Structures are given as C-alpha cells and as structure tokens.
Image (cartoon, rainbow, N blue to C red):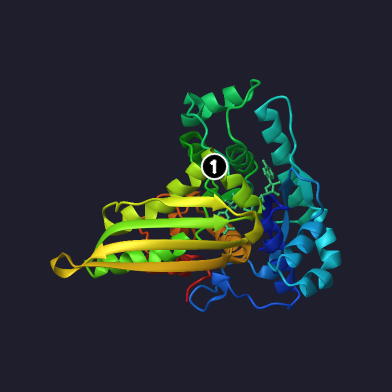
C-alpha cells in the first residue's frame, strides 16, 4: 500500500527528524527504536511497510530541509553521519515540501491545499494519503456557529475572513481531498462537529490529539499505579523546561494554555478525581530540543500517612516524537484502507488528549491498539 505522509510544518524539528529517520530506516542505516509498529505485538502485514511511505508536506518557512537536518545534527538530535549519508535524499524530499498556499478566502486556500494533496497523490501513485499536523501549536479559536454545521461552514469559508484556524483548515482540505488526518499537536484540528461530519461524509478517519512523548507518558503509567493500589494522590505538580521552536511558541500564553490543559487531563481520567496542582511550561532557549520535566507527587496511604515521589525526565522531544509520527501514518492509512471513517479512538495510546478515548492508562491503551491492529484485514496475529 503506497502511502503518502503529508506533514503540515514539514521543515520543523519533529517533521525533519521524522524524514531523516524514515530515510535512514529505508536505507537500512538505523534500527527502528521508538517505532511501536515494529514491535512483535504490533508488526503487521496490514500496515504499509516503511519502504512504501512517501513523505512531503506544507511549510511557511523557506529554510531548506537539509539546513534544518544539519541544525538538528549540530544540536545532537540526529546523528550527523546520517545527514551526510542522506544528503541527496533530503534534497529530493524537500522537492515535495510546498509553501502553504493562500487565497482571498479560506475556501480558496482549502482548494489550493487539496490540489497540492491531489498532485502529491497522483505524482507518486499513492493508494493512501495521511495528512499529519506537526506545525506550531495554535491558540484555541473563539467558537463560531459555522464550526458546528458543515453547510454554515462552507458558506462562511467562501466569504473573506478567518473562520478556521490553520490546523482545522488543513483538516477540512484533507477531508475534501479524501485524505485522513492526524493531529500530533494540541491545536483544534479536526475537533469541530462540522469537520467530524465532513470526515464521515468523505469516508475518511482522523486521529489526535497532541503526541504523548514525555511527562504525560510517564503520568499515564504512574497514575494507574496509584489508582490500583488505592493510594490517594493529593497533589501532582510539574514543570517542563524546553527550548526549540516549540518551546519558543509555548512561551506564548494562549498556546501554553492549550498545551497545559491537554497535559492534566490524564490525571482526572485515570484517578477518577483531579488532584491539586498544575503543569507549567517554561522556555529555556539553551536546552533546545532536550526537555526537562520535573514532577512532585504527594500522596497518602493507609491511615493517612503522607508520602511523596519525585521524578525527572530528560527527553529529546523530536527523537521521541518522530517514530510515533511514522507509526500514526501507517496505522491511519491501514484504518482507512480497512474502511474506517470518523475518529480512531484506538490510537489513544499515542496522545495526551485522545479523541473519544475509553482508556487513559498506557497498558490499557496498548491492549486496545494491539486488538485494533489484529482486527485489520490481513493483520491477524
Ligand atoms: N516533540 C514532541 O515531543 C511533541 C509532542 C507533542 C506535540 N508536539 C507538537 O508538535 C508540533 C511541532 O513541534 P516542533 O518541535 O517540530 O516545532 P517547530 O517549531 O520546530 O516546527 C513547527 C513548524 O511548523 C511550521 N508552521 C507553522 N505554522 C504553519 C502552517 N500554518 N502551515 C505549515 N507550516 C507551519 C513552522 O515554520 C515550523 O517549521 C508542535 O505543535 C508541538 O507542540 C511535539
């Protein structure tokens, strides 16, 4: 199954790491460490092979992909020897990265985005195209009646003005072009009733939100432990220090609010109550893509005895995110090929703020994911 992966934000850190990693895997220059679809429990002939993927995307910056990859190598995010070895391939992939088009109305812009997707599909003879949003996190938009109704939405988009934030306009264009959509960011994306109806009408699936790669990943393992041992979590506070483009953007209060909201959800859902405490994000330019999260948990046990736990996580955000982007593209393409449309709650394993999720602990999410892969035609284990 030849599968196009169209990255929104194709020259950002996550996208460029995904592209370097995919090229390295395809060339046999790296191990698929971090790719969960390469684990025995999930590896499946129902998924497109890594060699069947084709990557491209939209960008608003014109810094070449190769320059971005070199910067990531200098920062220690990807090995410099891979960027050297993959020089020509990176230049070739950059040929499939297009400037984000704009028109007088958002309907016009969406039509141009859809035309780029159709062109990508036909030039590479693709069976599936998955649009994956890895662009800058946006603030949540003010609600509008057009967000709830596809007819009102189409009318509003045809008039001048901004009706949808960029992530939602990308989802709209993807659906109208028959492409599935994955949101790796906390932005609004497909999470509007009008877009849900559009996805169903066009028979395409979507998944999100906000890749779970660090502090929230650890929370989704630790919180169930407290719940299963009937220990009462009293407070859970965390601070995340990060640099890079994502860190700079998240220093903006509105984008920061979107992110911190999605980081706390796992606690309430897993524990059944919301402990006191907050998650904060701070920008530290010097640490670039390497994030430090420090969490303090206070809890009480039998007869109210007070105890505490702390953990510190030092992660390379893009190296943690990139293999998941490849996993999500493969899984979503296979879901569409199997006739799925609308939300894919089975992919909640990958997200901080999963759409329609029934489970928030990592092991339950894993079981749901493995069952889903096993249920795909041709994917029985
Ligand atoms: N790295 C992780 O572990 C992780 C985890 C969860 C979510 N995310 C999210 O992934 C996204 C990408 O993170 P990053 O570190 O690569 O950020 P980044 O700043 O390096 O990259 C974002 C890219 O998007 C581009 N862009 C911005 N608006 C655009 C638009 N409208 N259309 C096309 N391109 C656009 C920017 O020019 C930039 O190249 C962020 O929203 C982040 O919150 C990352």
Regarding residue 214, the answer to whether it shows in the image is no
Image: 173 above or below 233: above
Regarding residue 315, the answer to whether it shows in the image is yes
**Residue at 59% of width from left, 38% of height from top?**
172
Q: Nearer the viewer, residue 342 or 56?
A: 56
Image: 331 above or below 32: above
**Residue at 50% of width from left, 29% of height from top?**
142
Q: Regarding mark 1 in the picture, which secondary structure is present there?
A: helix
Residue 260's x, y, as percent?
Answer: 46, 48
Residue 347's x, y, as percent?
Answer: 47, 59
**Residue at 55% of width from left, 74% of height from top?**
43
Q: Nearer the viewer, residue 2 or 92?
A: 92
Q: Nearer the viewer, residue 56 or 51?
A: 56
Q: What is the total number of numbered labels drawn onto the structure image?
A: 1
Left or right placement of residue 98 versus residue 295 in this view = right
Q: Does the residue tagged 1 have its C-beta within 8 Å of any atom of ligand 1?
A: yes
- Quarter assignment of residue 220: bottom left
Left or right placement of residue 129 versus residue 349 in this view = right
Residue 141's x, y, as percent?
Answer: 52, 33
Image: 215 above or below 79: above
**Residue at 43% of width from left, 46% of height from top?**
261
Specify few, some or many for label 1: CA neighbours under 10 Å numbering under 14, 14-19, or 20 or more.
some
* Farthest-out residue, right: 88
* Farthest-out residue, left: 303
- What residue is disc 1 on? 255
- Quarter assignment of residue 50: bottom right
The quarter of the rendered structure image containing the N terminus is bottom right
């Amino acid at each position: 199954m030849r599968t196009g992966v169209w990255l929104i934000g194709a020259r950002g850190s996550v996208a460029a790491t995904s592209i370097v990693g995919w090229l390295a895997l395809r060339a046999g220059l790296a191990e698929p460490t971090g790719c969960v679809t390469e684990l025995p429990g999930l590896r499946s002939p129902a998924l497109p092979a890594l060699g069947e993927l084709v990557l491209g995307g939209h960008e608003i910056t014109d810094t070449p992909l190769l320059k971005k990859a070199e910067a990531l190598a200098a920062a220690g995010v990807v090995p410099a020897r891979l960027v050297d070895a993959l020089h020509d391939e990176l230049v070739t992939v950059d040929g499939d990265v297009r400037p984000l088009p704009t028109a007088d109305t958002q309907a016009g812009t969406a039509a141009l985005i859809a035309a780029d997707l159709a062109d990508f599909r036909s030039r590479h003879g693709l069976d599936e195209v998955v649009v994956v949003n890895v662009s800058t996190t946006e603030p949540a938009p003010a609600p509008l009646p057009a967000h709830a109704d596809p007819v009102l939405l189409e009318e509003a988009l045809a008039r001048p003005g901004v009706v949808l934030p960029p992530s939602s306009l990308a989802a709209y264009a993807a659906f109208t072009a028959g492409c599935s959509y994955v949101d790796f960011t906390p932005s609004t994306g497909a999470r509007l009733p009008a877009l849900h109806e559009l996805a169903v009408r066009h028979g395409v699936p979507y998944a999100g939100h906000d890749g779970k790669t660090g502090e929230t990943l650890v929370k989704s393992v630790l919180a169930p432990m407290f719940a299963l041992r009937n220990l009462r979590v009293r407070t859970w506070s965390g601070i995340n220090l990060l640099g890079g483009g994502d860190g700079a953007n998240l220093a903006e209060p509105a984008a920061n609010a979107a992110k911190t909201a999605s980081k706390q959800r796992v606690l309430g859902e897993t524990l059944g109550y919301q402990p006191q405490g907050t998650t904060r994000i701070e920008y530290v330019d010097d640490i670039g893509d390497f994030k430090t999260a420090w969490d303090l948990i206070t809890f009480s046990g039998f007869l109210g005895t007070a105890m505490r736990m702390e953990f510190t996580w030092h992660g390379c955000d893009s190296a943690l995110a990139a293999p998941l982007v490849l996993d999500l593209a493969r899984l979503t393409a296979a879901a569409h090929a199997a006739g799925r449309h609308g939300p894919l709650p089975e992919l909640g394993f990958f997200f901080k703020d999963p759409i329609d999720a029934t489970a928030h602990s990592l092991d339950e999410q894993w079981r749901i994911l493995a069952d889903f892969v096993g249920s795909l035609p041709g994917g029985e284990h």
